[in-house]
Amino acid sequence: MRTRLCLALVGAVICSFLVAPVASARTPVVSVAGGAVSGARVDGITQYLGVPFAQAARFSAPRPAAPWSGVRRATTHSPQCPQSLPGGVPPALSPFTNSENCLSVDLYVPDSAATQQLPVMVYLYGGAYVLGSNQQYDSPAEMARTGNVIIAVPNYRLGPFGFMALPELAAESGGATGTYGTQDQQFALRWVRDNIGRFGGNPDDVTLFGESAGAMSVCTQISAPGSRGLFQKAIIESGPCVRSPLVPPRREIGYQRSEKYAASMGCADPRTRLACLRSLPIDKLLDSPTTKFDSPLATWTPFIDDVVLTTTPDEALRNGAAADIPLIIGSNADEGRLFVALFDYANGRIPTAESFRSTVRTVYPDRADAVLATYPLSRYRTPADALAAVYTDSLFACAASATTAAARAGGAAVWQYRFTAAPLGRSNPLLSGAFHASEIPFLFSRLGGVPIPWTGASAALARQMKAQWTTFARTGRPNGPGLPSWTPDGRFLSIDTSGSSMRTGFDALHHCGVWGA
């Protein structure tokens, strides 16, 4: 038995010391691209962890993984892709190792895969494109076992390592730039297509799902020409395809952001800039405000390079990119509470009336007066509550509603939800209500190896959501015996421990009139 510090980043920081699961004996050997691997029995399934799916030099497209000899023990996670620590956590407390040799996939395989071709679910983690790794999502074992699906969780590059955009990078790669993390995800999907059959999975029955930046990554893969046919269904959790700071901007914006960052690293001269950046150590490249998740504004996102990404997800959805891809799209009722905790409380600040108004004017300069009129402080218990409501509605709820509208305009079938369960209660002083990422522990049975100890109504809701997500992966519809009726008809499913039912009036609940385009 061993104790580990869990940093389960699903947009949040969930830290605690608990006992991690112990693997049993090694399992049968599976041959994949690169070599042979053996996994371990954990939580009633077989895990294959840290399986290399690609290798990549800095600021370059991923390439096939280097081959290995013998049987590789796939029983531990690979290092995480380089990233700063969230929320001011001291580096000495990190249980994870940064490495550019991080392009691995973790596989969770139920016993039934031995005799069936099972549906496959590929999960893309969140973290605002600067945080996250597959070892934080250990493990979806219960979802794999009870849902009869194989689940794959790949790593992808983050921050400047994943999204550096410079003219000289475009020149050396046929125009592709600012999309290395997106290419990693795409390479992982191709690896799944080519290798998952050896684990008992069906390469033609893949559901791509993700949360926060992982959900935005789902959006970008829907819009990416090179991803067509690599997945057949998609789930977008709290990471809308439109009206988000993570929406891919044009390449010129990427150049501006990356050139400013390069200058801050002491690499300002365009003639030597790329060689300079490639020569710097990882820690130096991470020593930048742009790699910290402490603001709703973003520097590092994919960019439309006109090669890997040729259009915005909004345009792609409206033009029918998901017409043959069933979608689940949703958000949480109190998303913004996490961001108040991260951006203010974690930095020793308690929002005041003055700071609330200042934040609104800084983040929403073009509509600040309308926002302040729509969210008067007199309506809320504290300025923090008002700020949380603004973040919830602007960044997530109304953007999710607009994403649903764009997808339906392009002919997609969309099942929309609003998650309202409060895993830490409704009066918690730091994280109350259905904050950002609070649905994740209802889908994963462990996060960072730490068991999720649901009981009673929460345990029942976890079973329900796992069944809905995996039923959707199997059938393209989230309905089945014992599950609440959920229809793709313009209403939304309100999901809560007290019960789940179809509702109307989503836009009114979140003041979406003020957040229009």
Image (tube, rainbow, N blue to C red):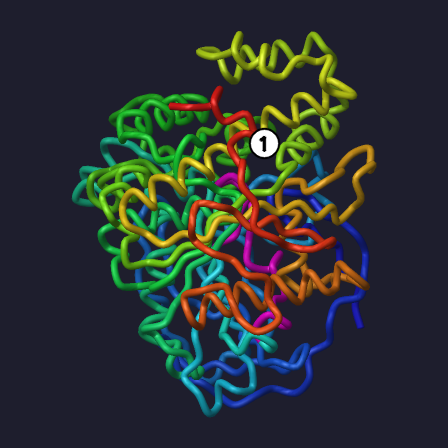
* Residue 500 in view in this figure: yes
Taking the spot 44% from the left edge, 82% from the top edge, the residue there is 199
Quarter of the image containing the C terminus? top left
Q: Please state if 170 lies on the left or on the right of 400 as rendered.
A: left
Would you identify the image quadrant in which residue 85 lies? Answer: top right
Q: What residue type is labelled 1?
A: Leu
- Toward the viewer: 408 or 76? 408
Give the crowd class for mark 1: few <14, some 14-19, many >=20 residues within 10 Å.
few
Q: Is residue 130 magenta?
A: yes
Q: Please state if 259 lies on the left or on the right of 14 as rendered.
A: left
Q: Please state if 72 lies on the left or on the right of 217 as rendered.
A: right
Taking the spot 49% from the left edge, 32% from the top edge, the residue there is 398
- Residue 486 picture location, percent across and down: 52, 58
Q: Please state if 315 lies on the left or on the right of 333 as rendered.
A: left
> Which residues are drawn in magenta?
124-144
State whether residue 182 is above or below residue 398.
Answer: below
Q: Please, what secondary structure does the residue beneath circle 1 have?
A: helix
Q: Is residue 6 magenta?
A: no
